[in-house]
Amino acid sequence: MRVPHRGRRGFTLIELLVVIAIIGILSTLAVVALNSARQRSRDAKRVSDIRQIQTSLELGYAEIGGYPSSPSPIVLGSANYDVMCVNGGSVFQASTTGCSTMLMGLVPSNPTPNGADYLYTSATGSATYSITFELEGQTGQLGAGPNCANQNGIIAGSTC
């Protein structure tokens, strides 16, 4: 005797668990890939910021023959050092007050999540400067961790 076929009305518990597990694995992989892309994006912005600052420093050097002096490190892009202009000399300052020539209207700061700040130093009357910054991962020839920029370019490692 043949048993009449009853139509399937849903999924079994095992089938549902397998589908949920697959979705969980795929979403985990997507989050990991997204975080990696965000980190690379922040590092690319850091390198771009440093190059923009260097260009502005060179414009100031060409105009007045020197770099802004700061024997002790200053945090670029902070409230007190977010404008670079010519004000009797090339300077980083908090506002455009007294600026005869604007070199950089908004000095960039390290993107969030913040690692180490962009630190600038240059001796008074010096023809040299250094900017230290950190990368989260390898970017081109620059390694993760501390890197340095000066009048000669961007240098891998923390020693300028």
Image (spheres, grey):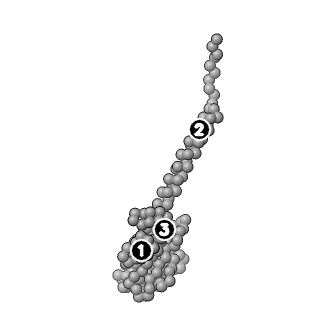
Residue 89 appears in which quarter of the rendering?
A: bottom left
Q: Secondary structure at mark 3?
A: strand
Q: Position of residue 91 (x, y in %)?
A: 45, 83
Which of the numbered marks, if any, corresponds to residue 87? none
Q: Are marks 1 and 3 in contact (CB under 8 Å)?
A: no
Residue picked out by circle 2: 18
Residue picked out by circle 3: 145
Q: How many marks?
A: 3
Judged left or right of residue 72, residue 15 is: right
Q: Position of residue 114 (x, y in %)?
A: 54, 68
Task: Identify the amino acid type marked 3.
Answer: Gly
Q: Earlier in the sequence, mark 3 or mark 2?
A: 2
Above-or-below relation of 28 to 115:
above
Judged left or right of residue 114, residue 46 is: left
Q: Earlier in the sequence, mark 1 or mark 2?
A: 2
Task: Identify the amino acid type marked 2.
Answer: Val
Q: What residue is drawn where x is 50% and y is 80%?
A: 73
Visible residue check, residue 139? yes
Residue picked out by circle 1: 149
Q: What residue is drawn where x is 51% and y is 67%?
A: 111
Q: Secondary structure at mark 2?
A: helix
Q: Position of residue 61 (x, y in %)?
A: 37, 82
Task: Identify the amino acid type marked 1.
Answer: Ala
**Residue farthest along the top direction in this orientation:** 1
